[in-house]
Amino acid sequence: MSNHASPDLFLHPDFDGHENVCFVTDSASGLRAIIAIHRHGEMFAAGGIRMFPYADTQAALRDVLRLSRAMTYKLAVAGLPVGGAKSVIIGDPEVDKTVDLLTAFAGAVDRHGGSYRCGCDVGINADDLSIIRDHTAYTPPARLGDLAIPTATGVYHAIRAGVEVALGKSSLEGISVAVQGVGQVGARLCKMLAADGCRLVAADVDASRSSAVAEDSGATIISPQEILAADVDVLSPCALGSALSRDSLPDIRAKVICGAANNQLAAPDIDHALHTAGILYVPDFVANAGGVIGGLQVDCGYDENESADRVSAIYDSVHAILRLATESGTSTNVAAERFARQILDAK
Ligand code: NAI
């Protein structure tokens, strides 16, 4: 039996002292979900809902434990007094997502009494969130709109910082960027990069999405199999996690990797391999914090202008983390986790 299948959840390799892990079922709607609160934080815990056709419960558990821990680090670096959490709903969003299932899930969020606040993630869109919002107050207010915009904006600022450090260029004009996955975030990022004069290459498994981006941003579309190996300055993983693996690493030609996808590293030591290969990896949880910064503005008591300033400050956080990595001779992910832990320990 592998460690992942250990019946003792406290010994699970991805268990990191999570403060609350809740298995949720509803037989009428077929809901099977896990809500993991890594840290409750000073105010509450927050993190999106992912709906995905996990191969089994172990795969879902692994994902929710890793994602909720990354949320704690993301929120710490973003300077918010909120702990990290995440939910996963086991199922195919195209097939299994129903109003009843979302309503049952909202009930589970509501029963946390505000200690957990949810938002969108892969497989759960703004329309789904509006159904959930009918049954619990613990979601971002509808008026905050599309949070993929601040997420893309944060990634854009993180790319600027990464390009400055790795390529010594203060402008993105003429920089080539390959975007893997042009969904809610990737498509918006392409628009921002195109406006700055970047040369874009993009790929999506959904052909309708890639052709929309070709039209909107002038991106050259290549196949999803080719995108990680594209001959570009920057690779931006904006699809699902684990894009950076032992298999994909030898093919990567970009000098900077910076994207929105959560858990880009298929295994923790890939970060070290990227470092050794001279590729600057901007840690995902630092680059993609814009959505949560935008989504928590009401709960945390700041306005739209301050929210925009906090999203722009991702640029400064990336610089600080890259400096720390250089000074300490560590990989960027190790430096980012150290940076986050320093903030958490100082509380
Ligand atoms: P999305 O589901 O709208 O877009 C993902 C896109 O990737 C889809 O168009 C999908 O067809 C495509 N895709 C999937 N596998 C692919 C592959 N192998 N090659 C190429 N394309 C592929 O999701 P969204 O909201 O744009 O999020 C993207 C990533 O950013 C996710 O990993 C998400 O967890 C992360 N993220 C999103 C935030 C948000 O505000 N939406 C906030 C923070 C992180």
Image (tube, rainbow, N blue to C red):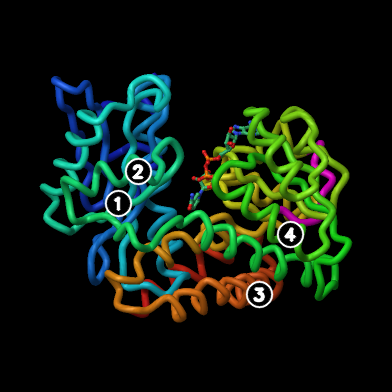
Q: Earlier in the sequence, mark 3 or mark 2?
A: 2
As measured in the structure, the alpha-carbon distance from the residue carrying label 3 to the one carrying label 2 is 30 Å
Q: Is residue 3 at least partly visible in the picture?
A: no
Question: Which span is picked out in magenta?
Answer: 250-257
In front: label 3 or label 4? 4
Q: CA distance from mark 3 to mark 4?
A: 19 Å
Whether pointer 3 and pointer 2 mark residues with C-beta atoms closer than 8 Å, the reply is: no
User: What residue is pinned by disc 4?
Assistant: 193
Residue marked by disc 3: 319
Residue 346 vs residue 275: left or right?
A: left
Ligand 1, what quadrant?
A: top right
Of badges 4 and 2, the one in the foreground is 4
Instruction: Tell me where residue 41 appears, x and y as whole percent.
Output: 27, 66
Q: CA distance from mark 1 to mark 3?
A: 29 Å
Residue at numbered disc 2: 49
Vertical comparison of 201 with 142: above or below: above
Residue that numbered label 1 is attached to: 118
* Viewport quadrant of the N terminus: top left
**Which of 94/114 is in front?**
94
Front-most of residues 224 and 305: 305
